[in-house]
Amino acid sequence: MQEAIKLAFPIILGQLGVILMGVADTIMVGRLGSDVLASANQANNIFFMVSGITFGVLFSVSTLVSIKVGEGRASDSFITYRAGLAAAIILFAFQFTVLEIIASNFQWLGQTEPVNQMAPGFLRIINFSILPMLLIITARQFTDGLGHTMVAMFITIGGLLMNIFLNYLLIYGNWGFPKLGLNGAGWATLISRILMALSALWYIRYAPAVAKYRPMKMPSWEAIKAELPEIWKIGLPIGLLTFAEWACFSISGIMVGWLDDNPQDNTRLAAHAVALNVASVTYMVVSGIAIAGSIMVGNAYGEENKKKIKNVANAILWIIVVFEIINALIFILFNRQIADLYGVKPDVHKYVLPLLAMAAIFQLADGIQAGAMNLLRGIKDVNFASGISVLSYWVISLPLSYFLGIAMEGDVYGIWLGFTIGLFVAALFGVFRFYLRHKTLNFEY
């Protein structure tokens, strides 16, 4: 357990840095009003929904690298990294095209008029940040897979501080900069991600700590092409898994946007944005723990050490459960203080407080399923994990959210109850599948 915490800690800080960029944006644009907050939320919803596919594919890089380390072939991992960069460029072209089509036809989503006016412009700006974001993920998956988790932590925290500073300048027009409002947050995100990507690529290319993994002669295109099929084979099911979960939350947010009768009113959507934003912070901590579990299980899988795989899994799941119980108590006892942090108006407040109580429940299931899915990733059992995700989120969560929230008029709470049930299903099936699959591993010890 101590080894898991030691490995997970810098990953957690790196994960928190990523999500805190979104938290900082939400807090800083939230003071411009509910319409701006709702617009930022919906644009980010769409961005990350499609990112579920592209990010998920690149998550395979750390799995493949950690297995090579366990097999004693760490020197071959640089080929995986370069193949990941090639995959990132292909994925960028796909995601950029999809998001541009959505931005040009945002009215398809049936949102209120203020959201339809503001969200597309913001989405188009952050659309250009896809390539640097995918390059960051590839570099991070490579260094994390090697166990060099501090690298991504420092780069991400630096990016977070840069993003907050640029938000201060560009959202509000401080120090003589233009007052760009919501679009200012978009430009701040774009600039920060470009600088983070350049830093990550420079580190891997020149840092002495990576020198022993960096070959004297860069891998040929033939070697990279030979590695790409393995990235697609492992990565596409992970991408489907990630997309199924992230799209569930994104589409749930779109449903929330249908609830307000007044086309100028975004009260419920703003409350949904705040509550989900808070829950995403705890999720990123758990995600860091889960990624550490995936790396450690991947190493043990490469070593063909069945006992070590189980011990790591037990430790990771117990850490997650204890952490999420503590979070639940914080969400319930300090919900008003958390809501006040975002500076929301009283009409938004009345929805935020009950949603934070619901978040206390669903984040426990969300944490366990994240742990289980990453453990499955560590033993290359990605196809079944993808099936669990599609079942839990698309067959159970979304129909239930629509039925309880829209058809049965359960309001935003019905929508949240729907995806909470889906998360519990994913958690139960994921844990059951991992331990069942562990029993069938044909390792000597």
Image (cartoon, rainbow, N blue to C red):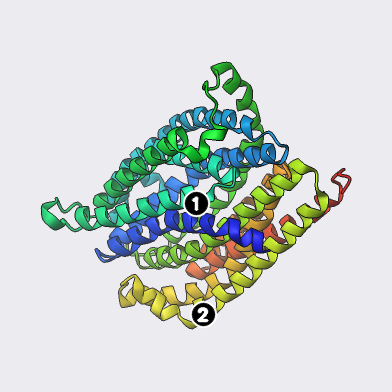
Picture residue at 57% right of the left edge, 23% below the top: 224
Quarter of the image for residue 264 reads bottom left
Residue 80: image location, x then y, percent: 59, 31
- Farthest bottom residue? 333
Q: In what element is the residue under mark 2?
A: helix
- Looking at the rendered structure, which numbered label has been put on residue 6? none
Query: Who is closer to the viewer here, 312 or 240?
Result: 312
Amino acid marked by disc 1? Met
Q: Distance between the residues labelled 2 and 1?
A: 33 Å
As rendered, which of 35 and 262 lies closer to the eye? 35
Eyeballing the image, is 90 above or below 171?
Answer: above
Quarter occupied by residue 143: top right
- Residue at (72% x, 57% y) in the render: 312
On the question of residue 49 being in view, the answer is yes
Residue that numbered label 1 is attached to: 150
Locate residue 254, reporting x and y percent.
45, 55
Question: Which residue in the rendered view is the most extreme toward the left?
Answer: 176
Q: What residue sits 62% from the left and 26% below the top?
A: 227
Res 111 quadrant in image: bottom left
Q: Which of 40 and 394 is in front in this view?
A: 40
Image coords of residue 246 (percent x, y): 53, 51
Left or right: where 334 falls relative to 30 = right
Helix, strand or loop at label 1? It is: helix
Q: Is residue 98 visible?
A: no
Check disc 2: other Cα within 10 Å, few if <14, some if 14-19, many if 20+.
some
Q: Residue at x 66, y 36 (%)?
A: 234
- Dot 2 and dot 1 residues touching (CB under 8 Å): no
Q: Identify the residue under disc 2.
A: 332
The amino acid type of the residue labelled 2 equals Ile
Query: Of marks 2 and 1, which one's residue comes earlier in the chain?
Result: 1
